Amino acid sequence: MSAIPTSTSVSESAVIEAPFSAVWHLIKLPDFAKFWSKLEKSEEVKGASAETDIVKWTFKDGTALEVKQEEHSSIDHFITYSVISSTPALSYTSVVSTIRVYPVTSGEHEGHTFTTWTGNFSSDADAGVIEDAKFKRREALADLAKAASKK
């Protein structure tokens, strides 16, 4: 497989050796700082409309993202969010990401959780953005696994 990205999307996944409920419990935008080691804090943005859930993620490197929850399903177990602002500014126009969790029901990983984290970027995202997104998702999934296995 080529190391050169040929699209503006990324998809990373992991089998997390923790029960489904322990993983799903952590998949809430305001709670990402509870597991993602790169985040200094995650906090709800006050003053947004009652229909809009916006969370500010402040990373340890000083980057701040405001993310908007676009979709949430406690039936299909996923959240979709978009980045609506960034300091410093992003080098691309937009990104929409989805985290989805599935219980593993049979086989050697029965009782564990399969997790995917995808991102669809605007066409102006370059190869560096895609590679960085892959790395950050892999790192965050590893952090999620550590946090969920402690429960």
Image: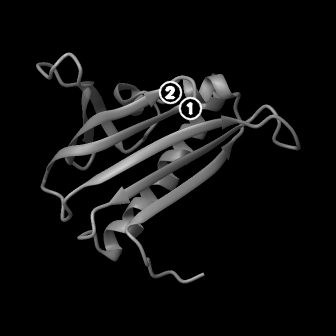
Picture coordinates of residue 55, whole percent (x, y): 26, 30
Total labels: the figure holds: 2
Residues at discs 2 and 1 in contact (Cβ within 8 Å) = yes
Mark 2, residue position: 26
| Amino acid type of the residue tagged 1 in the rendering | Ala
Q: Residue at the top extreme?
A: 50
Picture coordinates of residue 69, whole percent (x, y): 32, 33
Picture coordinates of residue 142, whole percent (x, y): 56, 47
Residue at the (56%, 30%) spot, across then down: 77
Q: Quadrant of the C terminus?
A: top right
Occupied quadrant, residue 88: bottom left
Helix, strand or loop at mark 1: helix
Residue at the (72%, 38%) spot, across then down: 17
Q: Quadrant of the N terminus?
A: bottom right
Asked whether, in this view, residue 131 is left or right of residue 14, the answer is left
Which numbered disc covers residue 147? Answer: 1
